[in-house]
Image: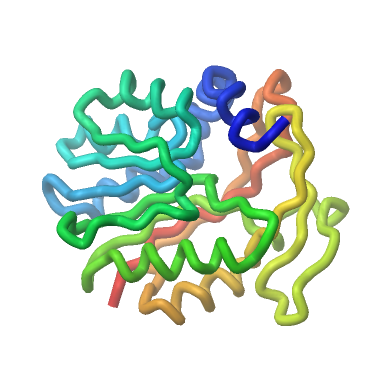
Amino acid sequence: MAMKDFYESISDSYQKAYANDPLVLGFIESVLSYLPPQARTLDMGCGTGNPLDMALAAAGHKVKGVDRSASMIELIRKNVPSGTFLTEDMYAYEHPKEEPLDAVFNVRALFHHMREPNEECVRRWGRWLPSGGLLCMVVLTADDYNPAKIEKYDADGQFARVRRRFMGREEVYMLPTRHGLKHLLNENGLVIVNETTGIFVPPHEADSDEAAQYCFIATKM
């Protein structure tokens, strides 16, 4: 099954399995305290919008999201009727210059089989933000993953090939290390101002690996 078709097939079950992750819910509470009133937010790889975009909209912020899964976009439009949501690949999306942003979000959605597309996403997100803007992410990092699942680290130690089981499907992704991610952020004028780590154990029916998650808020200098 192609990756796009896979995400089309799991929208309902994904929402049930991951919407109540305590670590992400706590991270959202932290993020809300950093945002200006009526912040203009962009959620890359937005999925169903539950819980992040629902919380942003409930707090009075302007929400826009991008996801390549039409079924996910259908759900998020129901969950967040006040938002604007596009069925596009976040790795190819270019944000209009005439739409200024206060914050860009990416929650458990930075997965690619190659390193460069992940790095380019962070570069673009940094370019879209003004000084003082926020990049808010929940990332699965290689150094927090089960060592038995790690196939190989890059020579510089900043990314690794990691086997991941998610919603019954096995894939190999390039995941950053925390050191590699911080290096990438700093190269693009982003400095972490809040960070936390923790493990989410998905329900048995999700048929997924434990998610060791690195949550951070970075500000654009």
At horizontal 13% and vertical 45% (from top left) the residue drawn is 38
| Residue 165 location, quadrant | top right
Q: In this view, does 17 lie to the left or right of 67?
A: right
Q: In this view, does 176 lie to the left or right of 29?
A: right
Q: Which quadrant would the N terminus be assigned to in this image?
A: top right
Instruction: Name above or below for residue 41 compared with residue 4.
Output: below
Indicate the position of residue 76 as horizontal and vertical percent values. 37, 26
Asked whether residue 50 appears in the rendered view, the answer is: no
Instruction: Name above or below for residue 171 compared with residue 85.
Output: below
At horizontal 29% and vertical 33% (from top left) the residue drawn is 55
At horizontal 39% and vertical 32% (from top left) the residue drawn is 49
| Residue 112 location, quadrant | bottom right
Q: Is residue 62 left or right of residue 193?
A: left
| Residue 160 location, quadrant | bottom right
Indicate the position of residue 212 as horizontal and vertical percent values. 65, 48
Asked whether residue 106 appears in the rendered view, the answer is: yes
